[in-house]
Amino acid sequence: MAIGFPPKYKKQINTIDINYAVAYISASYAAERLGWKIEGYTENGFYANTRLSMKSAGERVVININYSNIIVTSSCQGMQLTDSGNNKFNVERFIECFNILVTELSETIAEQRFIELKDSFGTTGSDILKRENSIRETSKSTKGKIRFIPESPAAAIIPTSNYYITPLLAFLNTAIFFIMVMAGVGFIMPETESLVEWGGNFPPDTINGDWWRLFTACFLHAGVLHLLMNMIVFIYIGVLLEPFIGSIKFLMVYILSGIFASITSVVWNTGMAVGVGASGAIFGMYGFFIALLVFKYFDSKDRKGILISILIFAGYNVMNGLVDEGVDNAAHIGGLIGGFIIGCINYIDKSRLFKKHHLEIISGLSAIFVTLYAVIIISVFVNKNDIELYYKIDKLIEIEEKANNSVSVINEFTSYDLTILSYNKGIEHWDKGIEMLDSIDIGEASDYLKERRKKMLRYAKLRRKSFELSKRAVELDTDKYDDEIDDCITEADKLVDEL
């Protein structure tokens, strides 16, 4: 199995003792016999695209032919990081077929066929053959062409003149994560409270005025594995997309798609989950890429393989989010849709409606679109009762602290009067908490918060009862209430675990 940017497999055939025309025509016949579609012939070889099948995802096979050897290179045309052995399979099948044909083909027939084939030699295939190790670049003459980048993953994190936003954003995400770790946030599995403190997208806080969380959440990650997986996928889409659309536009798409994803997460996550991670913005980049494919910004030869791999990637991650409660599927879907719509807005460039100030116009229209989306969807779909209910429930934590502080002075040396007074203060605090929870109007609240309020109310009543029984035990100087007190505490602890 090959891994790389993109995955590829290369092998050399020694042809030093074989007539050049025989080698060339045998290679051509081998590709035809395997059912590959040959796209371009040159004097130095040709390239072909494999057909889609269970063992092939439409790879491109480049055949470099010279007088001493043939170099066969199969590479993925989609956006996958691994090839499941497809490229090796293609190369080995080709070599096996070539070795059979080269023994059957006569020099006379081969040379005659080679002369006929010379008339079809062009420059398209030559361009493909020469760029195996080229960094991806975009110019007017190459627009719509997918160019390969170096196989070394290290090259993907080195900024160049037309590729610097992707490495900088990857560095920024990584730097923020390690700053958080040095500040005491968990390396493997951070506490939810820590993510909220650092700017996680927590719906009650976001809707209550912390709109900046829609942006900051895109740069936070819930553990090193979360960071690692996001950065690998982000760099891969970056090396394909940034040089093609331009670095500034790439940054614009990343930020606006991330905000769009965060907005969708706020509306979707009625369970008050904390949203963090660059995945919403990354899905936005894929959505933008789909728009480019739909509007035919790329050659038809490249379009099919890329589109298939994007749909597989998006489909797999969305399905995974449906079964894994820890995945913010709302952000993924929101980012994908947002990026696609921004890509549709970008079609203005292709239709030549605005020749000047294109970037400013596209950025402005996209920003207006995201703003309108935020205003409309939050005002229509966000349940303000949920937010109010959450904050009232959250106040119970403060009440519990006051109640516990009231009885914290009690020990074996505490006087009778102070002990009774302490329990009375604690009971008074719990009465306030119960009254507050009883007063909440839950008519239009979500089922999640209705159930949470019910459990919190039960918890408060159990804690009050344990205080009342403890006070009674002191008044009567008896231990007959110990079992009942233990039962209250055990049930209350169980509710805490559920909450």
Image (cartoon, helix red, strand yellow):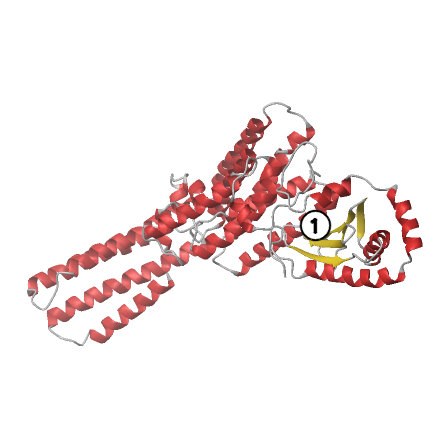
Q: Residue at x 60, y 47 (%)?
A: 150
Q: Residue furthest top?
A: 356
Identify which residue, 50 or 24, lies in the foreground. Answer: 24
Which residue is rendered at x = 78% and y = 48% of the image? 46
Q: Report the residue marked by disc 1.
A: 305
Q: Position of residue 228 (x, y in %)?
A: 48, 54
Answer above or below: position of 369 versus 499.
Answer: above
Q: Answer yes or no: is residue 202 visible.
A: no
Task: Decide if residue 20 is on the left or right side of residue 193.
Answer: right
Does 57 sit left or right of 460 as displayed? right
Q: Position of residue 70 (x, y in %)?
A: 76, 54
- In this view, the residue in front, 24 or 224, is 24
Q: Residue at x 36, y 49 (%)?
A: 180
Report the residue at 12% width, 69% height from top: 474
Looking at numbered disc 1 in the image, what kind of residue is underneath it? Gly
Q: Helix, strand, or loop for circle 1? A: helix
Q: Nearer the viewer, residue 363 or 223?
A: 223
Residue 329's x, y, as percent?
A: 53, 52
